Image: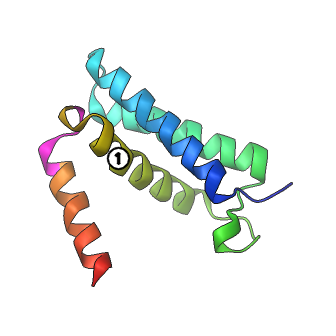
Amino acid sequence: MLAATEQDLYLYKGMGASYLCIATKAGIEFPKALGVASATYVQVVEGKHGGAVKELGDKKLEREKLFAGAEFQIVTTAIQYCPDSVPEEVTKKVSKILKENKK
C-alpha cells in the first residue's frame, strides 16, 4: 500500500469539507457532521493507504492522530468554502492555532 500523498489528502479534505458544508446546511449539527466527515477521511486513509501519510514517513499513524489531522484539515477547508457553516468559536480557535504555527 502506498502512503497518502499531499494530492490524496487534498482530495480527502475537500470531500470532507464539502460534506460538512452540505450537512450543516441540511440541519445536521456541526459536531455530528464533522465527526462523520472525519471518520470517512480516516477510513479512506487507513483502507487505501494503511494509515500512512507520505509527508510524515511511511509508518502507520495512530487513529487518534489521523482523526485530529482530519478534523483540522476539514475545518480549515470548510472555513474557506462555507464560513457560515462553521461555528464562530471553532473559527476563532483555528485562527489562533494557525497564527501560533506561523511564529
Q: Position of residue 28 (x, y in %)?
A: 31, 21
Residue at label 1?
75
Going 21% across and 61% down the picture, which residue do you hit? 95
Going 29% across and 24% down the picture, which residue do you hit? 24
Q: How is the image coloured?
A: rainbow
Going 62% across and 58% down the picture, which residue do you hit? 6
Please tell me in which quadrant of the rendered image residue 100 appears: bottom left
Quadrant containing the N terminus is bottom right
**Horizontally, is 46 left or right of 101 in the view?**
right
Q: Position of residue 74 (x, y in %)?
A: 42, 45
Would you place residue 56 above or below residue 86 in this image? below
- Nearest the viewer among 99 and 38 is 99
Count of marks, rendered view: 1
Identify the main secondary structure in magenta.
Answer: helix
At label 1, the amino acid type is: Val
Report helix, strand or loop for mark 1. helix
Q: Residue furthest right?
A: 1
Would you place residue 41 above or below residue 73 in this image? above
**Horizontally, is 15 left or right of 31 in the view?**
right
Q: Position of residue 86 (x, y in %)?
A: 23, 39
Q: Point out the stretch of residues depicted in magenta.
A: 85-89
Q: Label 1: few (<14), some or many (≥20) within 10 Å?
A: many
Going 27% across and 19% down the picture, which residue do you hit? 25
Quadrant containing the C terminus is bottom left
- Nearest the viewer among 78 and 61 is 78
Please tell me in which quadrant of the rendered image residue 34 appears: top left
Would you place residue 66 above or below residue 78 in this image? below
**Horizontally, is 94 left or right of 38 in the view?**
left
Membership of 47 in magenta stretch: no
Q: Residue furthest bottom?
A: 103
